[in-house]
Image (cartoon, rainbow, N blue to C red):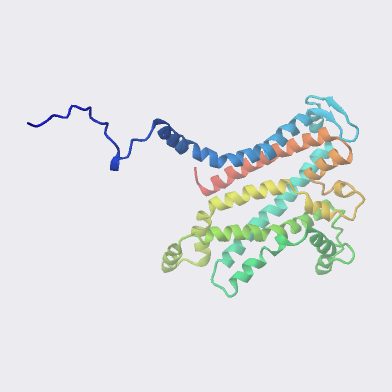
Amino acid sequence: MTSVDTRPARPATGTGGAPPPSRWRSRLARLDLKASPYAFVAPFFVVFLVFGGYPLVYTLWVSLHDWGLASGTRKWAGFGNYSYLFGDDQFWHALVNTVGIFVLSTVPQLLLALVLANTLNRRMRAATAFRIAVVAPLITSMAAVAIVFGQLFDTDYGFVNWILHSHIDWHANRAWSWTAISVMVDWRWTGYNALIFLAAMQAIPKDLYEAASIDGASRFRQFWQITVPLLRPTILFTVIISTIGGLQLFTEPVLFGSGTSNKMDGGATHQFQTLTMYMYDSAFGHDRYGYGATVAWALFLLIIAFSLLNFLFVRRAGGTR
């Protein structure tokens, strides 16, 4: 007689007889899947808050005070510094200098970088050596740059005046000082932007150029109708980066005026004093730390405004939405 097994059936097990995963492991796996992306990007935000966010908020707080480092003054001023800023002739003078040097340096710089990158993108001998050479100005000591350009733009014995057969006082005249500083900026940063353009150009499919050549398109037409449209995102990036750097210009004009009594004045009549120079001179030269913070915030808002304008201009010129 066959016996019947009356024991309760065991619960079904996983594949291979392994027990089913516990609830806490399933929850941990789901949590890991959802939280991992945030954990990977968290270090950036932590670093930004410590070194970017906190100084930004602290500078805003300082700008609302009559604050002096040497004197120890800590007096609430509200928007008094901002009211004074709008009527400060020297601030507006420095703003015009900053925008003027920015335009004179950035526009030729990006155009030259685009042409230089297009040249380096062609097949040529010693291409690697030429690509390394274009970034040599970027790694050159700024002290050496100041000495060399100081000699080039010297009023009495400068090489530039000798070439032009003229006697231009590059430091005393406002327009000429802007030009000399712009040449220093272009010499230093054109190669950097050219390498960015070159990297983007090398990502463009070669089939497009071959098809254009078969259709009889010249090199200039290929450059204008293939290269430039496909480089619009890169051009936008370089425009915004150049805008941020150009409006924060400090090192080149300071070194250009290294022969004057106060380098932060930007010449006897402040003819090439930029906003960053004025901010530094206000905060540390005249112990007006609160007003220097106000100038810093005005510069911050100016950079945002110019970056947005450039962004809209490049998008409009490119016909994108």
Tell me which corner region of the image, top left, top right, bottom left or bottom right, holds residue 58: top right
Q: Residue at x 53, y 55 (%)?
A: 231
Give the side of residue 199 with respect to residue 301, left or right: left
Q: How many marks?
A: 0
Residue 61's place in the image compared with 266, above or below, is above
x, y percent for residue 258? 87, 54
Pick out the residue farthest to the right: 261
Q: In this view of the protein, which residue sits in the foreground, 314 or 133?
A: 133
Residue 95 lies, in percent from the top left, at: 77, 42
Q: Position of residue 129 (x, y in %)?
A: 63, 71
Residue 140 location (% of width, % of height)? 74, 62
55 with respect to 225 (left or right): right
Q: Nearer the viewer, residue 306 or 147?
A: 147
Quarter of the figure with the N terminus: top left
Query: Which one is nearer the viewer's eye here, 141 or 229?
Result: 141
Instruction: Describe residue 43's horizontal placement relative to residue 171 as left or right.
Output: left
Residue at 43% across, 37% down? 29
Q: Residue furthest bottom?
A: 125
Up/down of 62 relative to 207, above or below: above
Going by the picture, which residue comes out furthest to the left? Answer: 1
Up/down of 141 relative to 84, above or below: below
